[in-house]
Image: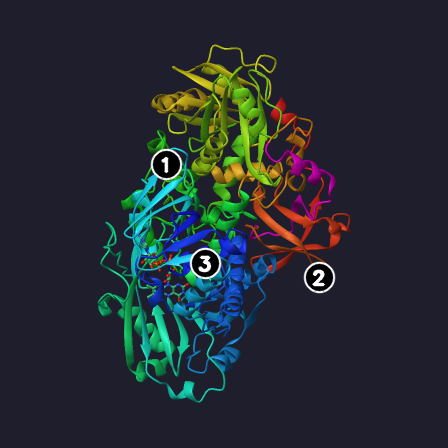
Amino acid sequence: MKEHTRVVVIGGGIVGASMLYHLTKLGWSDVVLVERKQLTAGSTWHAAGAFHSMNSDPNVARLQAYAISVYKEVEEISGQDVGMHLTGGITIAATSERWEVLRYEHERHRVIGIDSHLIGPEEIKQLCPIMDTKNVIGGLFDANEGHIDPYGSTVALAKSARKAGAEVYLKTKVEDLVHQSDGTWTVVTDKGNIQCEHVVNAAGLWAREVGRMAGVHVPIVPMEHHYLLTGDIDEIAEFDGELPLILDMDGEMYLRQERNGVLLGVYEKNSTPWSVDGTSWDYGESDLLPPRLDDIENELMRGFERFPSVADAGIRHIINGPFTFAPDGNPLMGPVRGVQNYWSCCGVMAGFSQGSGVALALSQWMINGETEGDIFAMDVNRFGAFASKTYAIEKAKEFYENRFLLLCPNDEWPAARPHKVSALHDRLQQANAVFGSSFGLEIPLWFAPLGSEPKETPSFRRSNAHEPVGEECRAVRESVGILDISSIAKYEISGPDAVTYMDYLFASRLPDLGRMRLGPLLLPSGHLKGDMTVMRLAEDKFMITGSGYLQEFHMLWFEQHAGGKKVRIVNRTDDFSAIAIAGPRSRELLSLVTSENVDNASMPFMSVHSMDVGIALCLVARISFTGELGYEIYVPTVYARSLYDHLFAVGDGLGIRAFGIRALLSLGMEKSFGIWSREFTPDYTPVMCGLDRFVDYGKADFIGREAALVDREAKPMHRLVTLEIDASDADAWGYEPIWYKDEYAGFVTSGAYGHTVKKSLAMAYVKTQFLDSSNNEFSVHVVDERRPAAIISEAAYDPSGSHMRS
Ligand SMILES: Cc1cc2nc3c(=O)[nH]c(=O)nc-3n(C[C@H](O)[C@H](O)[C@H](O)COP(=O)(O)OP(=O)(O)OC[C@H]3O[C@@H](n4cnc5c(N)ncnc54)[C@H](O)[C@@H]3O)c2cc1C
């Protein structure tokens, strides 16, 4: 066994083996994998081995497609048979709602790059003769689905890595991790110690235990999962070909061929978290759990109805095994804040669809310092301290039980809520708010009419929120609206080196004292890392605000670049609440609660002031995402509720009205304001999305400067535009394809109805070659129809910005 190496990957399941292979593939060969038993000794050995590339997140879908392509590659390199069955797969719809969703998905696959086809019941029957297609309306066929041998594929990955110089130590258990003062690690195993630069936690079922060795809480929960294997079925034995992988989401089951019988797996509503306090070191290798047939009876019965011959074939085996789920079902990968050179690579619930995609992205991150494209959906830093053990259990159970639920973009998942609440929560409840959840915090989405149930009807089309959101928008445009924006992240950066540090961190010029600026953060590749607002409170003290759900993601970035500098970086998000007031009468409202002069000369657009508002000393920023005259009031959380009440009391005569995030997004869309995770992500550069106007290319240095300068001279493939869509019943949500005549021209990033301009609007990336094309020939596929669309050259509302500046 080596005593020194660059990387120790802990865990020899499909994920650890994928990780080892990709580190070597990307050029690091001095790497080892340590496995306490033998390869596949966790969840991997008893998996059904099914894989598919479909995923609602396009970047995850792309990585899944990549993962599938790796199996053939490692089979060739290693000579190890991976047992690949590329049978194709069909997701079937047995309800009209599901069929509509599948058709919508099919359109969006054009954007993601998945070559899927819609097929009817007859074709489904031909491909899968054992299916009773009685109430099946249709299906979505993807040729890039099938199943793989779990053991063969894991071994092929490990062998391929070994051929490139990696080493694999079996029957070697990691017992402790000791962090050295220089940031390196001592990996303590039962066979001796290994010194290394990096450790990767790919310990699957034991990731929580390996996390604890480094002081890291891993919010995953193993869930029990069943599939059954049948004896031979005559129709299959006689069938000329192999059955495709079938996903029956309405029946909450999947099926694939196994020899001349089938494997039928179910996601039961009565789910069972397993070993919630930790996984015993004695579990594994060939252990299985006792079947709980009563709990899966309903789903099995539906399976037998859909595949009648399965019921007659006799059950050969029932497998019940545990595998791990993060609260939202996506992997937990990436560097962990506060623990240098420790990499999370766990919570991968679909190891055979995702293993190599996760491993590719994480290897890029370790070796190049960033991933190619936006992988936030899998980033471990999307969770923070709010993801406690209890939270993780409730959420994992919810995810498991709804794995195949028909999801609309406005669906809100109820488990473990309310979890965190803002100081204004009871006031928002009294006003009949419909809440969403962001980073564990309840946020007001919109306000239902008093006396009605505060609930939104899930739909791809305009929902019961449409009219109330319209009224909220009108209040902001015509008088004054008030919004709880406490979820905004607030960071304080100060100290003797604060200016040089901030100047290097942000691509923009720093604001002058008492002023604020929009500040893009760039990656070394010149792609976006953040879009934040920077306020200068003193010569050497800044307040930075940004999206609340990115707190860990941004704090990690800030801290990673602070090494050796005299700066103090503090996350003040929970210390300060924030209340936005916006609308033509917002200045009047502010003047009624402060003795300061708030006229345009004393308090101009983009200025920031420390001042008394009501009874509290607050920070007031003259800015508003609504495109109206407006202010963001940052108030110490203990005073937030009395200030909110005070504002409401004095605002009564001004027509004050509470509004929610939906109205905010609609108002922002009318101004063509982009948001993070939609228009702005690491997939794009400042030039592509128009944030280049905030980049100070002349500055001596900032992260990503060299690449940004090159990018500025190159013609981008896509540019961000705003579209008007001729749609009267639905608005775009994101990732809908845009067509120019019949050519694919780009995709939508977000959409909303503009209640002031009375138009359906969307923001979209359009290929630059189409930007000068005739504007009458564009169309966008929204829900079930191609709808005419046109690019608008300026914001739909107040393009000169006179209202904001008034
Ligand atoms: C019944 C069932 C069916 C499934 N079907 C599918 C399917 O069809 N398709 C699909 O994609 N996924 C499926 N899955 C999920 C799939 O099994 C997992 O996504 C995958 O196995 C996770 O792999 P892993 O490498 O992360 O973890 P694991 O397989 O749990 O591997 C972790 C490894 O780490 C080792 N280890 C842990 N701690 C230490 C230590 N301290 N020192 C050294 N070694 C250590 C363990 O011994 C183990 O070998 C199924 C799961 C179950 C239970």
Residue 743 horizontal/vertical position (percent): 71, 60
Whole-number angstrom distance, CA of label 1 to CA of label 2? 60 Å
User: Of label 1 and label 2, which has the lower sequence position?
Assistant: 1
Image quarter hosting the N terminus: bottom left
For label 3, count other residues whose C-alpha is less than 10 Å away and answer few (under 14), some (14-19) or many (20+).
many
- Residue 722 vertical placement versus 562 (above, below): below
Whole-number angstrom distance, CA of label 1 to CA of label 3? 27 Å
Which numbered tag is attached to residue 180?
1
As drawn, is 525 to the left or to the right of 196?
A: right
Q: Is residue 666 part of the magenta span, yes or no?
A: no
Which residue lies under the disc numbered 3?
A: 18
User: Of label 3 and label 2, which has the lower sequence position?
Assistant: 3
Q: Residue at x 25, y 57 (%)?
A: 274
As drawn, is 134 to the left or to the right of 804?
A: left
Does the residue at mark 3 contact the one at mark 2 (Cβ under 8 Å)? no
Is ligand 1 closer than 8 angstroms to the Cβ of mark 2? no
Q: Is residue 585 visible?
A: no
Does the residue at mark 1 contact the one at mark 3 (Cβ under 8 Å)? no
Q: What's under tag 2, amino acid-wise? A: Asp
Image quarter hosting the C terminus: top right
Q: Is residue 715 part of the magenta span, yes or no?
A: yes
- Residue 681 vertical placement versus 649 (above, below): below
Q: Residue at x 57, y 63 (%)?
A: 114
| Most foreground residue, 481 or 791 | 791
Is ligand 1 closer than 8 angstroms to the Cβ of mark 3? yes
Q: What's under tag 1, amino acid-wise? A: Gln
Which mark is nearer the camera, 3 or 2?
3
